[in-house]
Image: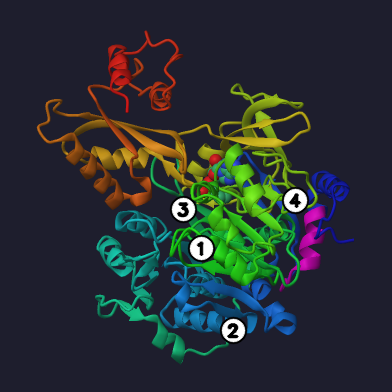
Amino acid sequence: MSNYHIKHLEEYYQVYRKSVRNPEGFWEEIAEEHFLWRKKWDNVLSWDFKKPEVKWFEGAQLNITENCIDRHLATRGDKTAILFEPNDPKEGSEHITYKQLHHRVNKFANVLKEQGVKKGDRVCIYVPMIPELAISLLACARIGAIHSVVFAGFSSKALATRINDSDCKMVITSDGSYRGSKTIDLKGIVDEALESCEGVEKVLVAKRINSDINMKEGRDLWLQPLLDAASDQCKAEVMNAEDPLFILYTSGSTGKPKGMVHTTGGYMVYTAYTFKNAFQYRENDVYWCTADIGWITGHSYIVYGPLANGATTVLFEGVPSYPDFGRFWDIVDKHKVNQFYTAPTAIRALAKQGVEIVEKYDLSSLKVLGSVGEPINEEAWHWYNDNIGKNNSPLIDSWWQTETGGIMITPIPYVTPTKPTYATLPFIGVQPCLMDENGKELKGNQVDGRLCIKFPWPSIARTIWGDHQRYKDTYFSTYENMYFTGDGALRDEVGYYRITGRVDDVIIVSGHNLGTAPIEDAINEHPAIAESAIVGFPHEVKGSALYGYITLKDAGESRKHDNLRKEINQLISDRIGPISKLEKIQFTNGLPKTRSGKIMRRILRKIAEKDTSNLGDTSTLLNPECVQEIIDNAL
Ligand code: PRX
């Protein structure tokens, strides 16, 4: 009997137990009954967290685009697959049916082939939220090329690092992008990046803003004429279940970004199954996730998960504030959106605008609300639940990560009773546990510890591109035989989980993961700066914001501090992107250090949080005198 769609709490517990007692049998049944395989697997699962190595559906063959597109053609050919809502509402939305998507993906796939892309090649996608973005992912998957999407808000330096790390031979981009009332010169950013990317042979350019851009002979090609000339039929490449589907970069607490590698079969099964249940998607529902496809949320829950279920998925180009702060609600009203998935930072920004603007729109189509990306605070939870959901649409606070590929802890709407700020129960097949700092598992309820996962789920990232050792060190070395998430969590009296935040040096700003080390490296490039330390502090809208403590080489630096602040943020924008800019910059004469020379971030964090009542023992510091000075000058 199929457990594909869970409808009540008892069923959840029953299916959950089954998925944990016999994971292989459970996932085999789901995979067998709900997907299209060219060849079935020889083995459902083999794993060893010590190596670490995880393989799902080994020996199976498939193409994910046949599951996301072709198999729907007979029954859903004229159904809208992608509903594109442009930045400017006056431009009008575009409905792309499954049939049209099939043609467009095939054409694009043929263009990729003609331009020399082969199975296994890496293709970097740096495209704004327009249909070509989703289509380019699918086109790569169609021919077995590995896509590496880079969020089109990253700077040229950040883009170049990612292109080079995975040795991409092609970049897909657009002439520019719209963002509210602004336009961004994306092609210019690509050109700058490619000055240091020797491996890139071709750049395909989609036309979006009709700007006058430079096209480098022999390298750059306009996409549209190539698409026009290409055939709309393209045989799907037969892939092994464990062949890489994509690479997606995420920030670590140190070093360069980590190219998380996701493979084909397990990722497809898990994202499709979670999508169906976590959003209780039913045929003819209109589903909207406001994330950008540049992040994992967009990969799994705008593109692959929804399309694998034959859903209608909204792709929104714009921002919540343009033309005004009613835009989200206008879109919900206009397209009669049933499931709406967004981030706490957007909720907080919209809540600030008051409810009057919400009340102008009819939101009665909504059935499910979702939140993802960072802890949702109590106030935002209630505002969202009461004013958008009208206390009537369950709010699912879904916890997961780039590394997990799909949703891991979440209420199932209409199934799991929700509790403000709690992600509640593990999804089917997920075995979370809490560990203390000494590596002991915290059993029972009402405990607070570090969140780990004991058993592999189908969409776990398999490695870090080009650096398996780092994959092992980061996720599998802190606790024996466990995947360590980097998050802290507590479990309440009924076993509900609440995620409390990162326990490492990753700071989540407006839902974006930012590692402190790359930002500090960027700042330290400034000739006037001796050293710096970045910490997070609570921010009303962004959740957390960045606080930088900066020591100048010459304390009597003649330049004005305000100018320096601008230069520092410009440097960060250039090196990483504007999302990493510092909210506050405090100039210091020194940073508190341990005797081994390590910066004591714990103290700096407390000062940034304005909580200096209990700084702990500072006498063991190398330079305790600097602490008072920092407190006195805190911003
Ligand atoms: O700290 C957790 C936080 O976001 C991190 C993962 O970020 P990223 O890989 O960018 O993926 C974000 C979207 C899946 C996690 O380690 N996080 C994500 N969702 C939640 C969350 N924190 C609390 N509650 C959540 N629902």
The residue to which callout 1 is attached is: 327
* In this view, 590 is above or below 324: above
For residue 420, the mark is none
Looking at the rendered structure, the kind of residue marked 2 is Gln
Q: CA distance from mark 1 to mark 3?
A: 30 Å
Q: Nearer the viewer, mark 1 or mark 4?
A: 1
Check if mark 2's residue and mark 1's residue have beta carbons within 8 Å. Answer: no
Front residue (pair 618, 545): 545
The residue to which callout 2 is attached is: 100
Sequence-wise, the earlier of marks 3 and 4 is: 3
Check if mark 1's residue and mark 3's residue have beta carbons within 8 Å. Answer: no
Dividing the picture into quarters, in which one does residue 332 lie? Answer: bottom right
Task: Magenta stretch: give its range.
Answer: 26-38
Q: Nearer the viewer, mark 4 or mark 2?
A: 4
Sequence-wise, the earlier of marks 1 and 3 is: 3
The residue to which callout 3 is attached is: 249
Q: Secondary structure at mark 2?
A: helix
- The quadrant where ligand 1 appears is top right
Rendered location of residue 620, percent (x, y): 37, 9
